[in-house]
Amino acid sequence: MKKITIAIDGYSSCGKSTLAKQIAAALNYIYIDTGAMYRAVSLYAKQHGFFENNSLEVGKLLNALPEINISFSYNASTNKSETYLNGENVEKDIRTIEISNLVSKIAQIKEVRKKLIDLQRQMGKDKGLVMDGRDIGSVVFPDAELKLFMTASPEIRAKRRYEELIAKGDDVNYEDVLANITLRDNDDTSRTENPLIRASDAIVIDNSNITQDEQFTLAMKYASEIINS
Ligand code: DC
């Protein structure tokens, strides 16, 4: 069967990774969460004291870039692919609201993006993968056979994210989560380097009012049409 590349882009907390994982499992494809890669670089910068009063010392990060190795490894007990930073499992540490608040500063740095995009292209060179992020259909894989662009209202996304964080035991309030999402939407769409834009050939899925199952069925219909064509 023909193997394709599926690019899923969209706003923060839109359920991109949930959909991407479902599609990857159904097609037996690799799933790559590129947001996790930007988060891992943010964690490295934080751990090494490159954030001084929330402002990033870019020069220090650029010097350290060659030392930052990011990889993914499948964990059979959780049935998930987990993120590793220099050999250490950081899957939990990169999902905190503190990292969410720092990551936009990291994602706007050209050299960071170049390093991560090179790695993403390497990971996807054999096709048969679903990759989610902000610039996958527009920059990383402009020739992807299927491009989805996901969106939902900020309030609905904040509610979903808040419930996820509470379920994990994080001490957060809804207003802070909504503020973080609004801020990241703004940062994602306004940065100079590869801002979040819908590729002209991407199919928009607004999931404000559809269930995860409906969204999955829709995406699989698009994928099957291409794979079987
Ligand atoms: O998908 P996420 O929320 O885990 O992504 C974390 C941050 O990384 C997000 O604020 C935007 C940035 N990002 C990016 O700039 N480009 C990507 N391909 C993926 C994520």
Image (cartoon, rainbow, N blue to C red):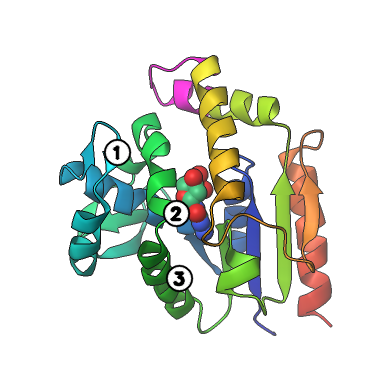
Q: Which residues are magenta?
A: 162-174
Q: Amino acid at mark 1?
A: Ser
Q: Which residue is mark 1?
A: 55
Q: Amino acid at mark 2?
A: Gln
Horizontal side of 93 relative to 8 (left or right) equals left
Q: Amino acid at mark 3?
A: Ile
Question: Disc 2, ligand 1: is the CB inside 8 Å?
Answer: yes
Q: Looking at the picture, how far across and down is residue 49, in whole percent?
A: 16, 42
Q: Looking at the picture, how far across and down is residue 40, in whole percent?
A: 32, 51
Q: Nearer the viewer, mark 2 or mark 3?
A: 2
Does the segment drawn in magenta span residue 172? yes
Which numbered disc covers residue 117?
A: 3
Q: Looking at the picture, how far across and down is residue 133, in whole percent?
A: 55, 56
Q: From where the camera sits, is residue 105 visible? A: yes
Q: Please report the residue visible at 34 percent of the width from the left and 55 percent of the height from the top.
A: 83
Q: Which residue is mark 2?
A: 108
